[in-house]
Image (cartoon, grey):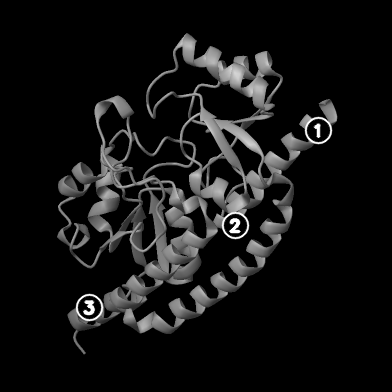
Amino acid sequence: MSKTKALLAAALCVLPSLSSAKIQIVTTTEDLAALAREVGGGQVEAQTIAKGYEDPHFVQAKPSYLLKLKRADLFIQVGLELEVAWAGALLTSARNTNIIPGNPGFLDASESCEVLEKPQSVDRSLGDVHPLGNPHYWLDPANGRIIASRIAQRLEEIDSSHAAEYRSNLAAFEKRLNEKSREWALLAQPLKGLGVVTYHNSWPNFARRFGLRVVNFIEPRPGIPPSPAHVQSLEKQMAREKIALILVEPYFDDKLPRKIAEDTGAHLVILPPSVGAVPDIKTYFGLFDHDLKLILGALGKSAAKS
């Protein structure tokens, strides 16, 4: 063997083969990345654009996002126009044809999920209402199961050599989700029928799954700041209906919600809607563990106070 051939052979030995390279997944939210890791296991590397503590409706584009998308084998979005202000422009600028809508590397996670609050009509007077339905559907574990299944199916199509592993990972995820769902149902029994006020309309799927009753919002319409008249009316309603909890997403200013809580005697709960919103929420399971614990803890304080 010549010296040149020997050097080439040595170089090839240290380069990873295509079959051993990890599938590069980019998701719009950390919730989707967490689910992708559950089913992809060691065969994938999942990165996210919006952090769990950020409002996924509004993301400032950065050059690093384009680099992620350029290298991606699979792009997964929440859909239902949650990311309409930024995702499309990033996909176009990344110039990775495989991950644009209609191609194998693009996945809209909302398809096949149960989507609530699909409006019959939309106009500006309704605020930032999503015309395709409420996009916070991942906050029902039943939809998490559907999302995970669709990710596994798409990974099998992209990387058929590891199809058996993806199916096995999905089965393990579904088994644990069944176990955790029974646990969460027992934990949530004290929440059945509990009236709450939320800042933004982020929680219909979560509320229905765990029995909460969202009676009103601090925003009079999605994305519309509350007026003094709305706040006054809301406080009267909370007093009349004895509403003890206010739930606020971590990316909203909590100054006004705290004032409303003080005025009404309600407890304010900063409730994360996404994986990664706080350091100890590292998985999809951890999101529901954390949020149910927060709500139940606040409910216990409210009961003790009364």
Element type at marker 1? helix
Q: Nearer the viewer, residue 264 or 155?
A: 264
From the top left corner, tell me how far across and down residue 286 is, in percent: 61, 53
Front disc: 3 or 2: 2
Circle 2 Cα neighbour tier, 10 Å, few/some/many (<14 / 14–19 / ≥20):
some
Q: Residue at 63% of width from left, 36% of height from top?
A: 195
Q: Amino acid at mark 1?
A: Ala
Is the residue under label 3 in contact with that under label 1 (CB below 8 Å)?
Answer: no
Give the residue at mark 3. Answer: 8
Circle 1 Cα neighbour tier, 10 Å, few/some/many (<14 / 14–19 / ≥20):
few
Give the residue at mark 1. Answer: 303
Q: Nearer the viewer, residue 177 or 193?
A: 193
Q: Amino acid at mark 2?
A: Phe
Q: Residue at 66% of width from left, 27% of height from top?
A: 241
Q: CA distance from mark 3 to mark 2?
A: 47 Å
Front disc: 2 or 1: 1
From the top left corner, tell me how far across and down residue 289 is, in percent: 66, 51
Whether residue 248 is visible here, answered yes or no, is no
Q: Nearer the viewer, residue 24 or 203?
A: 203
Q: Residue at 56% of width from left, 37% of height from top?
A: 214
Give the residue at mark 2. Answer: 285
Circle 3 Cα neighbour tier, 10 Å, few/some/many (<14 / 14–19 / ≥20):
few
From the top left corner, tell me how far across and down residue 134 is, in percent: 39, 45
- Image mark count: 3
